[in-house]
Image (cartoon, rainbow, N blue to C red):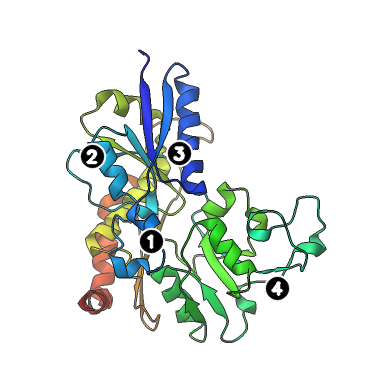
């Protein structure tokens, strides 16, 4: 393969850079002769930090400027958190690769019972400090006191938490991961909810008080997965990045995104879905493109206040991932999700 430079378009937050550097390292491993550089791009979502995402039209807020760089030749590939990627793409672009998924669940994080200042980002303790120095102020979600303040900018999370605990006070929490942890440590919240994948990728797993089960918080569409977008007609780039695609993750995310697309959902509506592979069609460790045998998909649509939540569940063949996503969306719509969506969009 001839030598060529590849430019990766990425946001400039620590987590976005982790994802871009991961893709860069994988490409360097596969193609040591190709030069790879990062083009750090500030998106609309990065600039607007004082307004809830739902109020500024959440679709595409974290990808628009990066897609413009792709179309303008200032980037060859774009690396995204899949939960930020709209279901529709500008003409000439497509989602070529979905990398292997990290933990898709949400993380409940409460403050640390430690009065000593820490020099580290977010105030977490050093690895050699004793467990006694890092006890959590609140041990788990079920231990939250009445009227506790929870920080999250996600309507999806707020809806599900309020459905279980309507006494909770949900308050807006924007900013990068380190900023959110700092606000928690400044006692602005009793606890915050973050995607477990981002916390783990930045090496802050010790900050996680509890991983929330799906019964408490069903994840965002594509949560924990990293996607690579590129120009459809760039044969070289499409061929180069193809080995980074993780089939099982791609199948699951495809089902989730089909569910979201059918509902025409965005950040303005509490929509959640999670797909997982059932019985595998191959032996452990064997790499092949044979589809796993079955796919299980759970989804929900809720009201902003959490007083109404419509849930659905479907199982079928993994090769029918998109059809399963559409079928599940039609199921929740028939159960009453359409009324919820109409009400929210009517606002």
Q: Name the secondary structure under disc 3.
A: helix
For label 3, the residue is 20
For label 1, the residue is 273
For label 2, the residue is 93
Which is in the foreground here, disc 1 or disc 3? 3
Name of the residue lying farthest toward the left: 91
Residues tagged 2 and 1 counted as in contact (Cβ below 8 A): no
For label 4, the residue is 137
The one nearer the camera, 312 or 44, is: 44
The earlier-in-sequence mark between 3 and 4 is 3
Residue 292 in view (yes/no): no
Measure the alpha-carbon separation of dots 3 and 4: 34 Å
Q: Name the secondary structure under disc 1.
A: strand
What residue is shown at x 45% (from left), y 70% (from top)?
157
The earlier-in-sequence mark between 2 and 3 is 3
What residue is shown at x 28% (from left), y 43% (from top)?
67
The earlier-in-sequence mark between 1 and 4 is 4
Q: Name the secondary structure under disc 4.
A: loop
Within 10 Å of disc 3 (Cα), the crowding (few <14, some 14-19, many 20+) is: many
Q: Is residue 341 above or below residue 10?
A: below
| Horizontal arrangement in the rendering, residue 154 relative to residue 330 (left or right) | right
Quadrant in the rendering for residue 134? bottom right
């Amino acid at each position: 393969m001839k030598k060529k430079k590849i430019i990766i378009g990425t946001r400039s937050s620590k987590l976005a850079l982790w994802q871009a550097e991961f893709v860069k390292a994988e490409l360097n491993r596969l193609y040591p002769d190709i030069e790879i550089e990062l083009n750090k791009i500030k998106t609309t979502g990065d600039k607007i930090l004082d307004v809830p995402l739902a109020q500024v039209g959440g679709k595409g807020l974290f990808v628009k400027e990066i897609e413009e760089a792709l179309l303008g030749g200032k980037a060859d590939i774009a690396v995204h958190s899949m939960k930020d990627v709209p279901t529709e793409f500008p003409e000439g672009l497509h989602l070529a690769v979905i990398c292997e998924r990290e933990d898709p669940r949400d993380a409940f994080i409460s403050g640390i019972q430690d009065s000593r200042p820490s020099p580290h980002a977010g105030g977490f303790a050093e690895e050699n400090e004793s467990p006694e120095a890092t006890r959590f102020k609140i041990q788990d979600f079920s231990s939250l006191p009445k009227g506790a303040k929870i920080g999250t900018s996600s309507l999806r999370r707020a809806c599900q938490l309020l459905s279980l605990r309507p006494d909770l006070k949900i308050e807006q929490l924007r900013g990068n991961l380190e900023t959110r942890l700092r606000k928690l440590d400044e006692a602005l919240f009793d606890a915050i909810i973050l995607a477990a994948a981002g916390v783990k990728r930045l090496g802050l797993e010790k900050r996680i008080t509890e991983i929330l089960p799906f019964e408490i918080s069903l994840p965002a569409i594509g949560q924990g997965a990293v996607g690579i977008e590129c120009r459809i007609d760039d044969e070289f780039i499409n061929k180069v990045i193809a080995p980074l695609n993780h089939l099982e993750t791609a199948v699951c995310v495809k089902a989730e995104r089909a569910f979201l697309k059918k509902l025409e959902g965005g950040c303005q509506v509490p929509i959640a879905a999670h797909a997982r592979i059932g019985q595998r069609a191959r032996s452990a460790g064997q790499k092949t493109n044979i589809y796993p045998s079955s796919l299980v998909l759970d989804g929900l649509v809720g009201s902003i206040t959490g007083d109404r939540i419509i849930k659905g569940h479907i199982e079928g063949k993994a090769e029918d991932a998109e059809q399963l996503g559409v079928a599940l969306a039609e199921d929740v719509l028939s159960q009453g999700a359409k009324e919820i969506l109409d009400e929210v969009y009517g606002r």
